[in-house]
Amino acid sequence: MAGYLVEDARKVTTHRLIEMKQQGKKIAMLTAYDYTMARIIDGAGVDIILVGDSASNVMAGNFTTLPITVDQMIYHAKSVVRAVKRALVVCDMPFGSYQVCATEGVTNAIRIMKESHCDALKLEGGEEIIETVKKILAAGIPVCGHLGLTPQSINKFGTYAVRAKEEAEAEKLIRDAHLLEEAGCFAIVLEKIPAKLTERVSRELTIPIIGIGAGPTDGQVLVGQDMLGLNDGFKPKFLRHYANLAETITDAVGQYVSDVKNGDFPNENECY
């Protein structure tokens, strides 16, 4: 399957992402959690595939990302990696796998990399986890940061509303972004913050900034199932639907059910 608007078919690396920012080339990032979807997304030209802890919501039906485990993230990441030829595969470190201490964070990070064969990891937070980030990087593991609305902290926030609207929180986010870059992160995801703040962070940092609900920046990320219209009823302001697969699949399954019950499937040409 040929990619769309892909000028360079080589494997995407963290170094190439920084080059893309320097050259003013936008970065496209989507989530995937299984082999079939990852193969399609990779073939369509996405630069980064995020094996997000949002699998907790999308694949397992949990209300938050908190319940998903390291074992489950490794399972999803392994499935994705097997399908991907070009995109950089980034795996989320799940809640509880790096917050206790740096040693435990490094141990889990190494395990995820060794068992999943993904290309990099993503961690939520700034100053609070910076020592863990540094030690994971020191182990030779690329790290993508994540600031703004950090879903693993939803119980602290108490809401999925826009973050960093007040000056104090905005200034902390900027400090955290600089700390992550100085530590050696290759990119940072900014989620659900004011567009003007995103613009400032992107301007001040040399590494790529990937936005979700954060306005225009070096790149964008969405949950694959959301942008494909598979999740009925989830329509935040930042989400653009590129398909309505929930309706398409419902119609297809309904036709299959009808054909089976009417005896139309299988027909003589579909039998051995």
Image (cartoon, grey):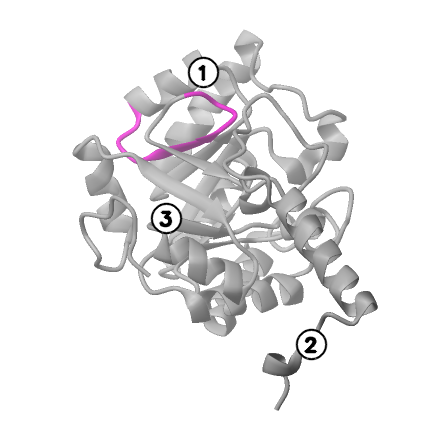
Q: Which residue is drawn at 57% across and 11% down?
A: 165
Q: How far apart are marks 2 and 1 (CA)?
A: 54 Å
Q: Pointer 3: residues within 10 angstroms few (<14), some, or many (20+)?
A: many
Which numbered circle lies on residue 231? none
Describe the element under mark 2 as helix, strand or loop: loop
Q: Residue at x 51, y 73 (%)?
A: 115
Pointer 1: what residue? 195
Q: Residue at x 60, y 68 (%)?
A: 75
Which numbered circle lies on residue 266? 2
Pointer 3: what residue? 46
Q: Of all residues shown, which one is farthest toward the right?
A: 261
How many marks overall?
3
Find out whether the residues at labels 2 and 3 contact each other: C-beta distance under 8 Å.
Answer: no
For badge 2, the amino acid type reads: Pro
> Splitting the image into 4 quarters, where does residue 136 fall?
bottom left
| First along the sequence among labels 2 and 3 | 3
For badge 1, the amino acid type reads: Ala
* In the image, residue 173 above or below residue 152: above
> Mark 2 or mark 1: which is in front?
2
Q: Pointer 2: residues within 10 angstroms few (<14), some, or many (20+)?
A: few
Describe the element under mark 1 as helix, strand or loop: helix
The stretch in magenta equals 204-215
Find out whether the residues at labels 2 and 1 contact each other: C-beta distance under 8 Å.
Answer: no
Q: Residue at x 33, y 61 (%)?
A: 1
For badge 3, the amino acid type reads: Val
| First along the sequence among labels 3 and 1 | 3
Q: Of all residues shown, which one is farthest toward the top?
A: 167
The reply, left or right, for residue 122 in relation to residue 21 is: right
> Mark 3 or mark 1: which is in front?
3
